[in-house]
């Protein structure tokens, strides 16, 4: 079995080599194994995908960590953790989620500047920077190279302020974040502006972007890492609901012809990770 340190080295190499790579988002052990079987080089967790499996709209920090462990144990690939706002406002308290995710098998993880509070959706600039700095300090204390991603959440919280988003990303970079991420960017020109403003690798999530944009397009403007957040989970739920509606409303079962053969699933799940 590949060690966590080896996974961490592989993850670092993906960020330092030329070009871009896709890091899809499984939400449990089964989907992690399936994506591994397709030949991806790394995976990332999704808190939305996890919430869907639990039948809720939100998840707790403990549930996030448990999901991290389940996915890390299911694959030989490096896995990056979606840790939301790390479960706390206080920088030092929030930073402990980095340590907990590492103990669960993660080799990278994110901290975001969204508060989870609708009345004040984004942390004040100075506090946001302090939180990232605290997370970086914990990441650097680990016995392997943990890739710390810092997220500026303006665009997914109705604040379409590119200047402030870039200001935050540059500040996160200055205090040591390894990867920078501004979810909610839609068009290639805006993505290019963000990439050009910083020197660290940039993650783009396609959940909010123009779906005509390709991986080659993103590579051409300098994007290093491409994720999809909870989009695969939502796509799976779309197929599930379509099958349910067909049965309930039409009394028909044509969806079965498009189902993955059980043998193919068993083969993927029995293969070595």
Image (spheres, grey):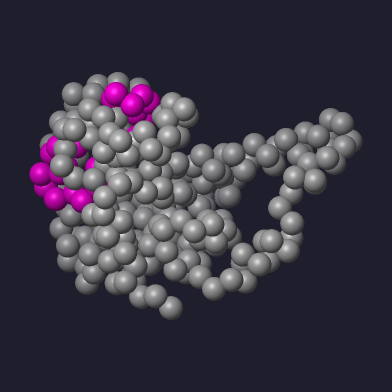
Q: Residue at x 61, y 67 (%)?
A: 269
Residue 78 in view of the camera: yes
Q: Is residue 173 magenta?
A: yes
Q: Is residue 96 visible?
A: no
The N terminus lies in quadrant? bottom left
Q: Image check: 26 left or right of 141?
A: right
Question: Which residue is most to the right?
Answer: 251
Name, please, the residue furthest toward the bottom: 1
- Which residue lies at the image location 59% right of the left edge and 39% below the top edge? 235
Return the x and y of residue 92 as percentages of the image width and height. Answer: 19, 54
13 lies left or right of 196: right
Question: Residue at (73%, 35%) from the top-left corner?
Answer: 242
Q: Position of residue 217 (x, y in %)?
A: 36, 33
Asked which quadrant contains residue 243, the reply is top right
Q: In screen coordinates, is 109 left or right of 124? A: right
| In the image, residue 34 above or below residue 271 | above
Q: Residue 21 location, x and y as percent?
A: 37, 49
Residue at 10% from the left image edge and 44% from the top image edge: 174
Q: Nearer the viewer, residue 152 or 226?
A: 226
Left of 244 or right of it: where is 193? left
Q: Residue furthest left?
A: 174
Compared with 126, 83 (above or below) is below
Residue nearest the observer in this picture, 156 or 229: 229
Q: In the picture shown, does residue 21 fall above or below 165?
A: below
Stretch in magenta: 168-190
Decide: is 56 above or below 39.
above
Queried whether the magenta region covers residue 184, the answer comes back as yes
Front position in the image: 94 or 141: 141
Estimate the x, y position of residue 190 in percent, counting from the top left.
Answer: 28, 25
């Amino acid at each position: 079995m590949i060690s966590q340190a080896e996974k961490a080295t592989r993850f670092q190499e993906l960020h330092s080599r030329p070009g871009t790579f896709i890091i899809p988002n499984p939400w449990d052990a089964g989907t992690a194994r399936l994506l591994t079987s397709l030949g991806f080089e790394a995976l990332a967790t999704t808190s939305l995908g996890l919430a869907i499996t639990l039948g809720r709209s939100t998840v707790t920090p403990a549930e996030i960590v448990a999901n991290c462990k389940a996915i890390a144990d299911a694959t030989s690939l490096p896995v990056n953790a979606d840790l939301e706002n790390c479960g706390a406002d206080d920088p030092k308290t929030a930073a402990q989620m980095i340590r907990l995710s590492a103990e669960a098998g993660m080799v990278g993880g994110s901290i975001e500047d969204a508060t989870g509070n609708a009345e004040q959706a984004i942390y004040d600039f100075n506090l946001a920077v302090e939180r990232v700095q605290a997370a970086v300090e914990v990441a650097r204390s680990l016995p392997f190279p943990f890739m710390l991603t810092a997220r500026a959440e303006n665009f997914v919280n109705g604040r379409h302020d590119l200047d402030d988003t870039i200001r935050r990303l540059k500040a996160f970079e200055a205090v040591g974040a390894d990867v920078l991420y501004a979810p909610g960017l839609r068009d290639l020109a805006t993505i290019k502006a963000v990439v050009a403003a910083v020197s660290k690798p940039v993650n783009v999530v396609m959940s909010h972007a123009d779906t005509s944009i390709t991986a080659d397009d993103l590579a051409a403007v300098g994007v290093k890492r491409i994720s999809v957040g909870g989009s695969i989970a939502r796509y799976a739920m779309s197929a599930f609901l379509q099958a349910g509606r067909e049965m309930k409303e039409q009394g028909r079962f044509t969806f079965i012809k498009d189902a993955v053969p059980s043998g193919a699933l068993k083969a993927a799940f029995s293969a070595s990770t």
